Amino acid sequence: MTTSYETREHDVLIIGAGGAGLRAAIEALAKGCSVGVVCKSLLGKAHTVMAEGGIAAAMCNVDTEDGWKPHFRDTMRGGKYLNNWRMAQLHAQEAPDRVRELEQWGALFDRTDKGAILQRAFGGHTYKRLCHVGDRTGLEMIRTLQDRGVQLGFDVYMECTVTRLLTDGGRVAGAFGYWRENGRFIVFKAKSVVIATGGIGKAWPVTSNSWEYTGDGMTLAYEAGAELMDMEFVQFHPTGMVWPPGVQGLLVTEAVRGEGGILRNKLGERFMEKYDPKRMELSTRDVVARSIYTEVKEGRGTEHGGAYLDISHKPADYVKKKLPSMYHQFKELADVDITKGPMEVGPTCHYVMGGIRVDAETAQSTLPGLFAAGEAAAGLHGSNRLGGNSLSDLLVFGRRAGMAAAEHAKRVSHAGLAASQIEEAEKELLAPFSNTGAESPYGVHRDLQKVMQSLVGIFRTEEDLKKAFEELEQLKARAAKASVEGSRLFNPGWHLARELKSLLTVSEAVALSALARAESRGAHSRIDFPNYDPVWEKKHNVIVREGTEMKRVESPVEPMPEDLKQFVMAD
């Protein structure tokens, strides 16, 4: 029984319209392909706009001794050597060209006195290398890429959610989805698919991520037979707003610390002196987040359970010029003037280093014809991402994914779309309307967030992770029974019922990988295994689907070439 649905055909279908998706679209269009871009919300509302601090690229405009090799070294050291070294190399080498390209397409950057793109310091980076537009860099990037893409002519499917990838003979053939506004189905035929759907933050209650971040792309890839990797590494950004409750988790950019902001506890102590006396507030994100968490846990936290971040020692005009968004954010949302007093901040779930396992050169997943870039893909960041590396990641690997997807599309013909797959996708999507259970999707989501926050948070233990598994199994059973009322016309409860499947899939992958990794490394901190284990430096956790079961296998970390290794290890 197939109800009516519209069908669209493209050479390359891109799921996600953030920096990675748009950059991939521009590249595929330049190669002469027909390109469709599907986005869950409106064009321009992608999460990339939340990236405020800057784009990491060794332009050498401020620190002339910088170069791709120091950038590569900082990325590898930040990721604690679990990074795909080739991705880190390509990223460091190609980032400056990608920034220059953005500039040519009309991006307006802050400038040095001599007119070059200005660069600022950021945590974990040896040199000043973040190209920025005040603290609104992501917004400028999206504006520029969108203008470029629209000018070149891609088809955009806004407020459209893809729920299943369609395959044929072991390769991607297209995708099935629905229009969020009217609930009607849509089938895409495509020779190549690029996943650029971002992260998984909505599995946690305190997150800087917007409502779209439910792990959809990773789940689509996993269910179609692609592999996920390094899912245990979830970054908690050290500084999110903690008060008032309505804005809890909203990002406070690292640029505040990059411009000289100081962290203090309620006793007025500059506590980073204890945890990283050399780099202080500009230590890596995992270290700063755990430091704030520890101060709060030991009773030295602020009134609302955070730390004070103070930039008020700088001239007011300087703060307003360098951090305009932060000034307005705190004034309007918390009634705090950051030029006169401190902000209250605490860790917030921010970014996942894990994701779809891809090839460094082409960004192709383990499933032919399926590519991934940006936060949805794993490899570049290892166990911990440095600030600013996400925006250059989007540009470098968005371009590579778009190029390889276009080349793949030119080599193959359209595959057949099996009616049985479409019927199955339809049946699954409509199930919540016929479920008679009393479970509400909202209740299941709330309980999932509690489990992830309390048992799979900043600090983890074997006991907590095993308990998380039991809870996730129960939540899966509840989610399968979740029922919704009303029609398919814009029905948020129905949308959430679908997203629960993605959230539960990625949550299970995180917990499974975190339980296996019996060490602390980067963003993964085990209280029962507080040290590095050299055995775990040599392997990745890979998540695969066997039948209906999720399985974890181990895969060796590819060793760095000797010349690069010597450079990275040298002091």
Image (tube, rainbow, N blue to C red):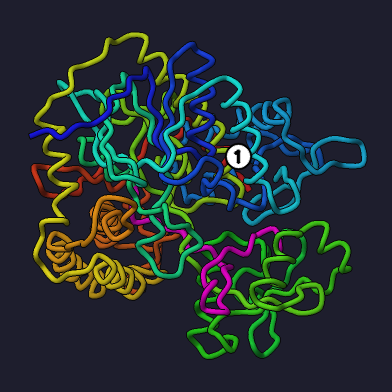
**Which residue is at 52% across, 73% downward?**
248
Residue at (32, 23) in percent of width and height:
8
Q: Describe the element under mark 1 as helix, strand or loop.
A: helix
Quadrant, the N terminus: top left
| Residue closer to the observer: 323 or 468 | 323
**Residue closer to the observer: 25 or 186:** 186
The residue nearer to you, when weighing 280 against 472, is: 472
Residue 178 vs residue 391: left or right? left
State which region is magenta: 230-257
Crowding at mark 1 (Cα within 10 Å: few <14, some 14-19, many 20+): many
Q: Residue 559 appears at what percent x and percent y?
A: 40, 35
Q: Position of residue 91 (x, y in %)?
A: 55, 33
Query: How many numbered marks are there?
Result: 1
Q: Is residue 326 visible?
A: yes
Q: Which residue is mark 1?
A: 142
Give the image location of residue 22, x and y in percent: 52, 32
Residue 195 in the image: above or below residue 474: above
> Within the image, what quadrant is residue 67 found in?
top right
The amino acid marked with disc number 1 is: Ile
Q: Is residue 314 above or below residue 179?
A: below
Q: Is residue 232 above or below residue 315?
A: above
> Which residue is outermost to the right?
113
In the image, 187: left or right of 521? left
